[in-house]
Image (cartoon, rainbow, N blue to C red):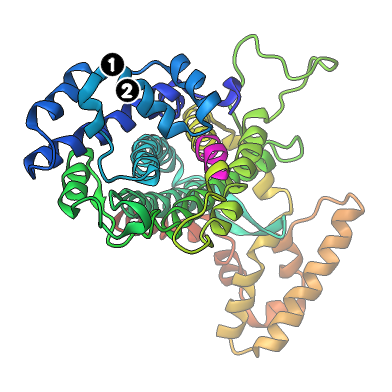
Amino acid sequence: MIPRYSRPEMTAIWTAENRFRIWFEIEAHACDALAKLGVIPASAAKNVWKKGKWEIARIDEIEKVTRHDVLAFLTNLAESVGPDARFIHQGMTSSDVLDTAFSVQLKQASDLLLNDLDKVLKALAKRVEENLDVVTIGRSHGIHAEPTSFGLKLATHYAAFARAKKRLEAARDEVATCAISGPVGTFATVDPRVEAHVAKKLGLSVEPISTQVIPRDRHAMFFATIGVLASSIENFAIEIRHLQRSEVREAEEPFAKGQKGSSAMPHKRNPILSENLTGLARIVRASVTPALENVALWHERDISHSAVERVFGPDATIALDFALTRLAGLIEGMTVYRERIKENLDSLGGLHFSQRVLLALTQAGVSREASYRLVQSNAMEFWRDLQKGKTVDFKAKLLSDPTVAAHLSPKALSACFDERFYIRHARKIWKRVLAA
């Protein structure tokens, strides 16, 4: 991932330095276990920890000859350890190191992402509480529907991110497995107790069966999970982009002092953060299909998955980390324009109360079909008046309809036009979200 969309904490996980450090720890912990089993001298295991060093430039130089990254690393490590290096990697195969290290990196990445999610949830919860009592127009198909709470609009996203957190916790646990099982996964040349020891030291679980690689359905689930999370980010971002449109102007992402929206038009305040989140979500989701395709490998091992993971493993997690951090900042700094929300709510003259009138008529003894026709005919005439630029009021129009007046008194009709009616359960819904 390019530096523009990278944060140092997540980027550090995917550096060569961190990767080789994990490789060294795998090899050194394995030596400890082998020494305890009496397979290698205890002094050799101690020397690996004491003398073991590596140098990235030297590893790269060796790999130009070996064309094998693990062998290049082991060769460089042996240069510092000396004769005891012959006991390193005893009975192991390259995938034992590569796959176990990848598990550690994904676990590290997951921990950062979960921390990012906590910040998003905290920011959202605060904004929900602030806006639960704000009545806004709900929209379906982009058209005014019925009123809702602006806080509940945000609460739907809170619930989505809370579900995402649970999924990510499960995906982290599923992908955090250790495989030290030797060629084709039979443990013929390395005792299973070595694997158990390394797993415990690295905070991983033991892979029950690992051919010569850790099964890639685990990784597929991980990347599918962050792909869904990315879509939830985009879902929120699109909502803000729509609310910030000039014709709507109900909410706006932060616009910093000195910020410029356009090189040509000084008046512009563009939703660039939200648009950027939409783009970053595409990058994260792009990892899902190759992760699914990596599940199908030849026999006990091939490396068709290797290059793919080396690209999308870092890119997807780095992009998601950046996106979640940007999202938390957007939520914290978002402006909600309550006056404009009220203007938009009132802009159609009360048309959004149509269902309440419909239901009141049915309660007054009119059939549902007849009630629907009666309310809709008034609504369609009302639409035509609006399109002609007339200032109209839906309640007044209904009051002037003799058929409506025959079934609903002015008091009964007025009772249908209460905006607070639509948010009377808002806090109860929010409590349910938090309880879930």
Q: In the picture shown, does residue 3 fall above or below 154?
A: above
The residue where tag 1 is placed is 80
Q: Above or below — where is 50 with respect to 119?
A: above
Question: With respect to residue 169, does 263 lie above or below?
Answer: above
Residue 55 image point, x, y percent: 39, 15
Side (left or right) of 91 relative to 6: left
Tell me the element at label 1: helix
Secondary structure that dominates the magenta span: helix
Q: Are marks 1 and 2 in contact (CB under 8 Å)?
A: yes
Q: Which residues are magenta?
A: 308-316
- Between 332 and 347, the residue placed more toward the observer is 332
- Residue 5 bears which disc, if any? none
Could you tell whether 133 is left or right of 65 in the image? left
Residue 82 painted magenta:
no
* Magenta span includes 310: yes
Name of the residue lying farthest toward the right: 388
Q: Which residue appears at 29% of the width and 56% of the height?
A: 207
Amino acid type of the residue that numbered disc 2 sits on in the rendered structure: Leu
Q: How many numbered circles are shown?
A: 2
Residue in front for this viewpoint, 396 or 373: 373
In the picture, the quarter occupied by the C terminus is: bottom left
* Extreme residue toward the top, this view: 258
Residue identifier under label 2? 77
Q: Quadrant of residue 241?
A: top right
Dot 2 surroundings within 10 Å: few (below 14), some, or many (20 or more)? Answer: many
* Figure quadrant of residue 294: bottom right
Q: Is residue 341 visible?
A: no
Label 2's element? helix
Q: Residue at x 44, y 38 (%)?
A: 127
Q: Quadrant of residue 25?
A: top left
Amino acid type at circle 1 is Ser
